[in-house]
Image (cartoon, helix red, strand yellow):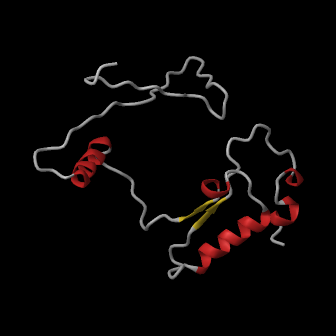
Amino acid sequence: MSSESLELLLDTNSGGMGVRLGERTLHAADIITTENLPGENPYHTDIRFCKLMCVNPKLPEAPVYGINDWYFAYGKNSRDLILQTTSLMSNQVTNWDNPPFSVIDMGWSVKPARTNEEYCWGDDFNQGK
């Protein structure tokens, strides 16, 4: 690959399994590139580039914020850790008209749980105990 070319590799697996399209066609990507305009700083190039990628974005009405435990627990979560970090986030909220989210993320599970007991937090977590 030369410095004048781009290479794109798209992984269309879903959770480690190949996607079965049958007779369907998957439109996986549109390639869009840009360069800084003369005198344009990186921030403004980024804004212009985002507008090239989507001319009519569907933006949220308010900022989206919260916790996804994968980014610090990496699947080694527990009932207590989830409750602790969710409580920490909720204690920082000053405007409950736009509440935070708390995502419990176990990453790419090799074997999905069949019952609540197979999750690390157990059945009592789901019943609010």
**Where residue 63 appears, x then y in whole percent?**
44, 66
Q: Give the answer, above or below, for where 77 lies relative to 15.
A: below
**Where residue 125 appears, x then y in whole percent?**
82, 65
Pick out the residue farthest to the bottom. Answer: 94
**Where residue 69 appears, x then y in whole percent?**
64, 58
Residue drawn where x is 10% and y is 45% of the image: 38
* 42 or 17, nearer to the observer: 42
- Kindly indicate the quadrant of the structure image that contains residue 54: top left
**Where residue 118 appears, x then y in whole percent?**
87, 50
Residue drawn where x is 61% and y is 76% of the image: 90
Q: How many marks?
A: 0
Q: Give the answer, above or below, for where 10 lies relative to 62.
A: above
Q: Is residue 91 left or right of residue 95?
A: right
Q: Give the answer, above or below, for where 95 lies relative to 38.
A: below
Residue drawn where x is 43% and y is 61% of the image: 60
Q: Quadrant of the C terminus?
A: bottom right
- Kindly indicate the quadrant of the structure image that contains residue 71: bottom right
Q: Quadrant of the N terminus?
A: top left
Pick out the residue farthest to the left. Answer: 38
Residue drawn where x is 20% and y is 39% of the image: 35
* 36 or 119, nearer to the observer: 36
Q: Is residue 76 left or right of residue 18?
A: right
Q: Give the answer, above or below, for where 46 lies relative to 25.
A: below
* 57 or 16, nearer to the observer: 16
